[in-house]
Image (tube, helix red, strand yellow):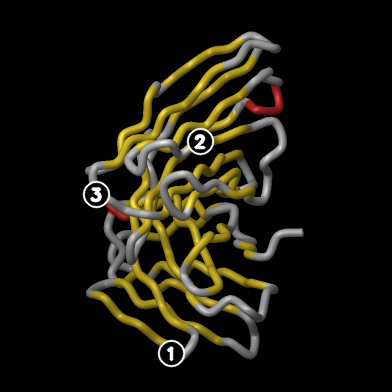
Amino acid sequence: DQQVKQNSPSLSVQEGRISILNCDYTNSMFDYFLWYKKYPAEGPTFLISISSIKDKNEDGRFTVFLNKSAKHLSLHIVPSQPGDSAVYFCAASEGGNKLVFGAGTILRVKS
Amino acid sequence: NAGVTQTPKFRVLKTGQSMTLLCAQDMNHEYMYWYRQDPGMGLRLIHYSVGEGTTAKGEVPDGYNVSRLKKQNFLLGLESAAPSQTSVYFCATQEYGYTFGSGTRLTVV
């Protein structure tokens, strides 16, 4: 039973537009959420995170929104760039250890 | 990825063979993890360590063993490889955030 779900296997967006990647979780004990970006033949790299005490965190073009009542978070990328094309993983944890990952969403940004 | 080195990068094994994957870090982090990545499954935790001499099971530990004899190294062993262990394996260390290695692609035929 997957505790972290990314229901969209892929997403295609035009350059300059907004990319919205979604993630749902089932474990109400999760208190820390992260997004990772992964290019082929490389390990995941940290993108942005949010604590359960917040509902929004912003870092440049990247914003993560958390809706605890719906157990849902989303990553917004504005504006999207071709270099953003990668696999994006949502992850969650209790207390910051032992991350639980979603299956990932492949983002393609078309120029 | 700086600081976490995985060896080998690629390996093909025959069913029943054994091998050890090495993860080495130079960041003096206490926590180390082994994950496997499979299509449609994301990354799943195999085993982890919270410090030198400690290991613990993750979500999918069956068929694997680990050792953390030195703080900087975390070894993942497959005693008798099975085709179901064909995967990409990632090691990660943790201080405040996670740092991942570049992965080991293992094929068991």
- The chain carrying label 1 is A
Q: Is residue B6 visible?
A: yes
The reply to whether label 3 and label 1 mark residues of one chain is no
Q: Amino acid at mark 3?
A: Met
Q: CA distance from mark 3 to mark 2?
A: 18 Å
| Element carrying mark 1 | loop
Which label belongs to residue B67? 2
Closer to the observer: label 3 or label 2?
A: 2
**Decide: marks 3, 2 in contact (CB < 8 A)?**
no
Relative to B11, is B99 on the left or the right? left
The answer to whether residue B40 is above or below residue A63 is above
Q: Earlier in the sequence, mark 3 or mark 2?
A: 3
Q: Is residue B58 left or right of residue A89?
A: right
Residue type, mark 1 in image = Lys
Check the image and report above or below for A91 versus B10: below
Where is residue B5, by image quadrant?
top left
Counting from the top left corner in percent of width and height, residue A6 is at: 60, 62
Please give the name of the residue rendered at 51% of the width and 48% of the height, measured from the top-left corner.
Answer: B54
State the residue in front, B33 or B56.
B56
Badge 2 amino acid: Ser
**Circle 1 is placed at which residue position?**
A54
Task: Tell me where residue B101 appears, x and y as whole percent.
Answer: 36, 40
Q: Is residue B97 above or below residue B51?
A: below
Residue lying at 59% horizontally and 78% vertically, measured from the top left: A72
**How much space separates mark 3 and mark 1, taking CA atoms?**
30 Å
Q: Estimate how packed mark 3 is, as few (under 14), some (14 to 19) or many (20 or more) residues with alpha carbons within 10 Å.
A: some
Relative image position of residue A104 (x, y in whole percent): 54, 54
- Residue B27's label in the rendered image is 3
Q: At 60% from the left edge and 15% from the top edge, which residue is drawn? A: B18
Q: Looking at the picture, does residue B64 appear above or below residue A80?
A: above
| Closest to the observer, A96 or B50 | B50
Return the residue found at the far right: A1
